[in-house]
Amino acid sequence: MTPARVCDVLIIGSGVAGLSLALRLADHASITILAKAALSESASLYAQGGIAAVLNARDDSLAAHIEDTLDAGAGLCHREAVEFTVAHGPEAIRWLIDQGVPFTRERGEEGVLGYHLTREGGHSHRRVIHAADATGKATETTLEQRVRSHPDIELREHHIAIDLITRHKLGLSGENRCLGAYALDKSSGRVEMFSARFVVLATGGASKVYLYTSNPDTSTGDGIAMAWRAGCRVANMEFMQFHPTCLYHPRAKSFLITEAVRGEGGKLTLPDGTRFMDAHDPRGELAPRDIVARAIDYEMKRGGLDYVLLDISHKPAQFINEHFPTIRERCRQFGYDITREPIPVVPAAHYTCGGVVTDLSARTDLPGLYAVGECAFTGLHGANRLASNSLLECLVFAEAAALDIATALPQSEPASVSLPAWDESRVTDADEQVVVSHNWDELRRAMWDYVGIVRTTKRMERAKHRVDMLREEIREYYSHFKVTNDLVELRNLVLVAELIIRCAMARTESRGLHFTRDFPGADPRLANQDTVLTPPAAQFSSARATA
């Protein structure tokens, strides 16, 4: 039997949440990070806008940030989670500065060099610190360099986790607990065992379940699906945030146009130049993302349009070049000069507000298992995430998890080296990969058409019927053939799709990101009522291909 690879803490995922957690824990424990692709290939890398935190106490306040977050969350934010996150925001930014993240600087009114703060939709003040228009890249690459140079952090790139290992899945008596994970080494095609005292899911969101998304190909809901199969509750999956402005071009691969373009004066127009946002919300272009996305969706469908336009060309070219160099260059590659002409944009799936239920220490329902970042449901975002609160949540809850794990380590049992090996004796190589690719495309198109920005009960029923059929086909395929990266991701995506549909059908109102024509208004009786799903106990005791 091949022994399991052993560590104190196994972190599944390599975005800002996973890397910052690893760095905070590395002096207390041995760390292994599993990255699906290259270490830096995560949604964090693509975050353009910045990180929201109260850094200018003279003009801003924690109370204002809290109220802005609660307002965007449309009555579903957990106040204690909001207060906890906002209160720890300034400290999290100082930690990043200490790590060397090169945030954009400016000279203030008195000539003092400080950090430039921008304003985004839903914020009442300028409080978003950023590194030009590539904050995620600057943060991710800085943390990556520190992680790669740390002697107590082991990196396993191109490894996709398949399933969590738990006591109950192995048929062991006593309290259930997470013991590690099985992961596919994509380079060798072998499934490896990883045993750990504690496991942290930092796998990101599930936007790839939709046909159009601003996220990288790795955003397939892996952590949410694995946690559900291990017995953890999942909540508020109906609240999928669609970013209103992604570059419309057949070769752009849904390149995101940051919220900050509108925050700095960018205007949304129809192709004939007519502005339309004021007709949908008095805040115009600075309305929260869900309102802007629905407005664009409405105008596109009303006019039979393929896109609308985002125009910041009225600003000086020097201003645009200084604040949006990445966007300027990317648009230039596709033939658009944003200093002279508007940008064609469309909405795309962007952020998963729901996820694995956790407490304020990032602990899940399963002892030994934590979840941080986009895969977690902390209660911070409610029915709609406030712009630039995502990286903030990653940092704050990574620190919270690190503190909790460091405290628990001395009393925890050593990780086991004798976990049962992955059993492939009853499976063969796949005979037709077209089954996977076809189901992948059909699933994502069905979710886009039926469970997208605007929903109806009939559309969701159609989606559920199709997803139920696809899930059965994928389950049978998974039972007979060796695992591949595409199969693992498809298995997770179809489960996440089911969870989204179940949550959406259970919410008989329109609130935040969930808008249904059958219940177009918010029901005051459902304020503060999360949609919580509990997995059936029967599935905990069995897992395919474990001895």
Image (spheres, rainbow, N blue to C red):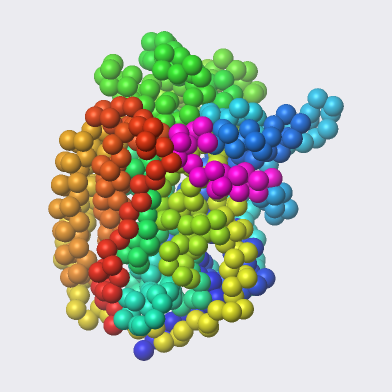
**Residue 470 higher or lower than 25, as above or below:** above
Q: Residue at x 65, y 30 (%)?
A: 126
Dominant secondary structure, magenta: helix
Residue 75 is a magenta residue: yes
Residue lying farthest bottom?
1
Is residue 110 in view? yes
Residue 89 percent across, percent down from the top left? 65, 46
Q: Is residue 216 left or right of residue 16?
A: left
Q: Is residue 471 left or right of residue 104?
A: left
Quadrant of the image occupied by residue 397? bottom right
**Residue 90 higher or lower than 489, as above or below:** above
Q: Is residue 278 left or right of residue 303?
A: right
Q: Residue at x 60, y 44 (%)?
A: 83
**Residue 501 higher or lower than 347, as above or below:** below
Residue 153 percent across, percent down from the top left? 59, 70
Q: Residue at x 23, y 37 (%)?
A: 450
Is residue 134 in view? no
Q: Is residue 120 left or right of residue 117?
A: left
Residue 335 is a magenta residue: no
Highlighted range, magenta: 70-90
